[in-house]
């Protein structure tokens, strides 16, 4: 999954903390996805940290962050501990990070805001040693922010049609033939088709899903292109009328400037979640560290609200808050604050077995190649 964010200043802040580190020992180092942490949050946390050196180091992609964990595990430094206290990874990598022993469990008792997270967001990071969901498992990560797969469409084209997309089933309408762009990803395209048919994105045996292949073939007839990165450009130019993409790419400003609208499908969608994890080589502590303070800081209502509005993502903590206490701009933004019924029907993409992945890939190639 490619996520794009536009944030100015984090590189300068990182440089300043490195320079400060020449005079003062580093107290906290965090590896993050570029653009995922607003400068305002960084500045406020530093102010509250009594002048301790806090270093946020941006990486271009989530995969780069996961590879850092693997590198530290295979090539530890002389002290046996990486020079980073926290790393951001996507929820999809959590299973592998646990299995490969790249990270260590966290202690939620050190976080004052933990119990305010909705239970689903706490349960997703509670795993056994195999990385599987387990109500008796340990807490391996701290949820930071999330987003969804959405339908984005041109207002002018659909005004002429007399209807607007509301759910995945609308993508099969005949008037959209050769007018749609979909992600170039088997899990997303097969997943939304499964959702249309009443199944989960994580269905493990596709052979048990009646009409799946025929539905994918019908959808393929409406697709003009498959693109996971630059799908907004043809939509803005009018080459396509509808695109399936990610909520982080379609801020209110982008919608307004280009005559676009976006909707989270009523029957549910794919969810993604960015997490804070602690590398395996970091020394454990029974007392709250500055890393624990940062995790808890991100869940403070005011900070979580700021995070959501500045990065066009959703801090999970706000989903458990009284909507009336949220700013109108957040409360009335259906992408940042989806209906509870939609979230209930939505799925986090879970790792599949090699046999299941082979099924998905074979079906994907069959549809794309028109076999």
Image: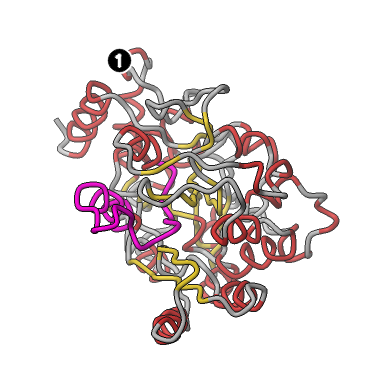
- Reply above or below: 364 against 247: above
The residue at 78%/65% (across/down) is 327
Left or right, residue 314 beside residue 327: left
At mark 1, the secondary structure is helix
Give the vertical position of 278 relative to 348 (above or below): below
In the figure, is residue 97 to the left or right of 359?
right
The one nearer the camera, 347 or 225, is 347
Question: Which stretch appears magenta?
Answer: 63-92
Q: How far across and how far down the image is residue 32, in percent?
A: 42, 63
Q: What residue appears at the point 68 percent right and 50 percent down from the top-left corner?
A: 317
Q: Residue at x 72, y 41 (%)?
A: 115
Q: Nearer the viewer, residue 159 or 258?
A: 258
Whether residue 57 appears in this view of the structure is yes
Residue 195: x and y in percent read 48, 30
Residue 199 x, y percent position in the rendering: 47, 23
Q: Position of residue 17 (x, y in %)?
A: 45, 81
Residue at the extreme top of the image, as rendered: 208
Instruction: Name the image quarter holding the C terminus.
Output: top left
Q: Which residue is mark 1?
A: 207
Does residue 58 appear to the left or right of 335 in the view shown?
left
Does 177 appear above or below 28? above
Queried whether the magenta region covers residue 84, the answer comes back as yes
Q: Along the horizontal axis of the image, is 296 left or right of 197?
A: right
**In the orientation shown, which residue stands out farthest toward the front?**
79
């Amino acid at each position: 999954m490619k996520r794009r964010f536009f944030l100015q200043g984090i590189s300068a802040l990182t440089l300043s903390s490195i320079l400060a580190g020449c005079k003062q020992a580093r107290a906290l180092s965090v590896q993050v996805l570029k653009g995922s942490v607003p400068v305002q949050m960084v500045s406020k946390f530093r102010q509250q940290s009594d002048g301790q050196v806090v270093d946020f180091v941006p990486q271009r992609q989530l995969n780069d962050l996961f590879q850092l964990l693997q590198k530290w595990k295979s090539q530890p430094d002389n002290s046996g501990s990486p020079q980073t206290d926290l790393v951001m990874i996507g929820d999809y990598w959590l299973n592998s990070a646990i299995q490969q022993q790249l990270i260590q469990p966290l202690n939620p008792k050190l976080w004052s805001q933990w119990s305010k997270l909705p239970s689903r967001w706490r349960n997703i990071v509670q795993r056994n040693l195999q990385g599987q969901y387990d109500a008796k498992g340990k807490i391996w990560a701290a949820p930071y922010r999330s987003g969804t797969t959405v339908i984005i469409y041109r207002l002018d084209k659909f005004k002429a049609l007399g209807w607007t997309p509301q759910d995945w089933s609308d993508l099969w309408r005949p008037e959209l033939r050769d007018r749609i762009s979909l992600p170039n990803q088997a899990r997303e395209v097969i997943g939304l088709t499964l959702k249309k048919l009443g199944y989960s994105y994580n269905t493990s045996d596709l052979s048990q899903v009646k009409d799946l292949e025929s539905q994918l073939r019908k959808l393929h007839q409406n697709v003009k292109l498959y693109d996971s990165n630059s799908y907004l450009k043809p939509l803005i130019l009018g080459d396509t009328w509808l695109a399936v993409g990610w909520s982080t790419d379609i801020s209110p400003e982008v919608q307004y400037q280009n005559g676009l609208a976006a909707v989270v499908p009523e029957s549910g969608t794919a969810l993604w979640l960015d997490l804070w994890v602690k590398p395996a080589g970091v020394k454990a502590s029974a007392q709250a560290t500055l890393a624990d303070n940062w995790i808890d800081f991100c869940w403070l209502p005011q900070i979580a609200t700021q995070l959501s509005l500045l990065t066009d993502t959703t801090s999970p903590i706000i989903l458990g808050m009284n909507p009336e206490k949220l700013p109108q701009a957040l409360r009335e933004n259906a992408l940042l604050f989806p209906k509870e019924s939609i979230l209930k029907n939505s799925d986090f993409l879970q790792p599949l077995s090699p046999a299941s992945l082979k099924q998905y890939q074979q079906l994907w190639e069959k549809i794309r190649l028109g076999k």
